[in-house]
Amino acid sequence: MDLTRVLAGPWASQTLADLGAEVIKVERPGRGDDCRLFGPPFLSREDGRATGATSMFLMCNRGKRSLTLDLHRPEGLEVVHKLLAGADVLMENFRVGGMAKLGLDPVRLRDEIPRLIICSVTGYGQTGPYVDRGGYDPIIQAMCGMMSVTGRPPGEPGSGPIKTGPSIVDLFTGLYAVIAIQAALARRCRDGRGTNIDMSLLDCGVQLVAQQAMLAAMTGAAPAPAGNTSNSAVPGGGYDCADGHIVFAIGNEDGYRRMCQAIRRPDLATHPRFSNNIDRVLNRQELLAILLPIFASMRADDLVEALRRCDVPATRVNDLIEVRADPQVIAREIFRDLPDRNGEPVPQIAGPLMFDGERAMAASPPPELGQDTDAILSEIGYGADAIAALRAKRIV
């Protein structure tokens, strides 16, 4: 049962749906998940008819059944309890205490259903001085230090904290939630007990800052953003060419020597100030003063080809239209359509999980609001008259 909305929770439950879980998405009658409103754009049919589906909703809700339900009414809570009796996992992302106000306190639910796994996704976790605050990805990116190490280096034009393009803290929190739920399911197979899982966006955000956070922990100094390059390996990263932008990666000293060969500057491989990565990091600006004009004088495709011939991983920077046209992306069938109830195509981006050559991906697209309400209620014992009564009261 999925009581979450917007992104971190729905991203987790979509991944579970891709892996074979039956997911019942509970939404507010008449309005649904907030991200149904995060538009335009809205998906349109060939005849120009708008479906009301936004890109945000379509990206994280495939494979689910939509049940509309007013959780603030006793009749709605009765439906929830009937569904929970047969559920393995309950996901929610209310603020701390929000579930208890609805009469769905996680501790009491576990007393009633000891085998139930409850995954709570919040901005700051179930403890600490910030438990009453709402958590949103941009706020967490700022708080966890991610924005402080993202962007151009200090002093360069356009420098200053930068948010990542995707809502990366939400997305990774969703993935960590999947890991936690799977671990809880595995433990329940051993001892029959459920678990209360406490997922915090801030916890995940600090974890994601990774090597930069560890650098600060080791040195007591806050690392500065390095733009498209790296604080710990030089050269490597993104650079400007005469007609575009490229990125290449140097994994070791052999890679650096091959890069020097690709740009026809083998002397830089043996230069005493650049011959190993420690020296190149210390003398970063001196080396880049030599390399940047070379890169800027070359066409991006020519430089990428020269680097690849010397076995240096490199690519142009693609926009997302170019990504869709990439032969490798096409071969892997990452962008694909799923037919809705009327046979109309709904665009989807397949998940990355492959098992025995088959991609784990739910077969149904994100649902229309409340499309499964009657069927789900029928499955838990509600007759046609009872369903009609709930609808007349706007419970569903």
Image (cartoon, rainbow, N blue to C red):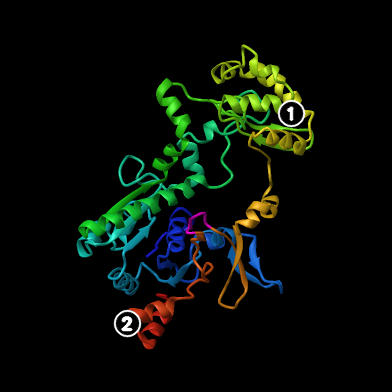
Tag on residue 396? none
| Residue type at the position of mark 2 | Gly
| Residue tagged 1 | 295
Report the magenta residues as a range.
351-356
Mark 1 and 2 residues: CB-CB less than 8 Å, in contact? no
Residue drawn at (51%, 60%), measured in percent from left and top?
359
Instruction: Indicate the position of residue 117 as horizontal and vertical percent values.
Output: 29, 59
Instruction: Out of 379 and 137, give the one closest to the viewer.
Output: 379
Residue at the spot 63% in from the left edge and 36% down from the top edge: 313
Horizontal and vertical percent position of residue 315: 67, 40
Residue 392: image x %, image y %?
42, 82
How far apart in space, not on screen, are marks 1 and 2 (Cα)? 69 Å
Q: Per the image, is 333 magenta?
A: no
Q: Which amino acid does label 1 sit on?
A: Phe
What is the x, y in percent for residue 207? 42, 38
Query: What is the residue that sits farthest to the bottom in this orientation?
Result: 385
Q: Residue at x 23, y 57 (%)?
A: 190
Residue of label 2: 381
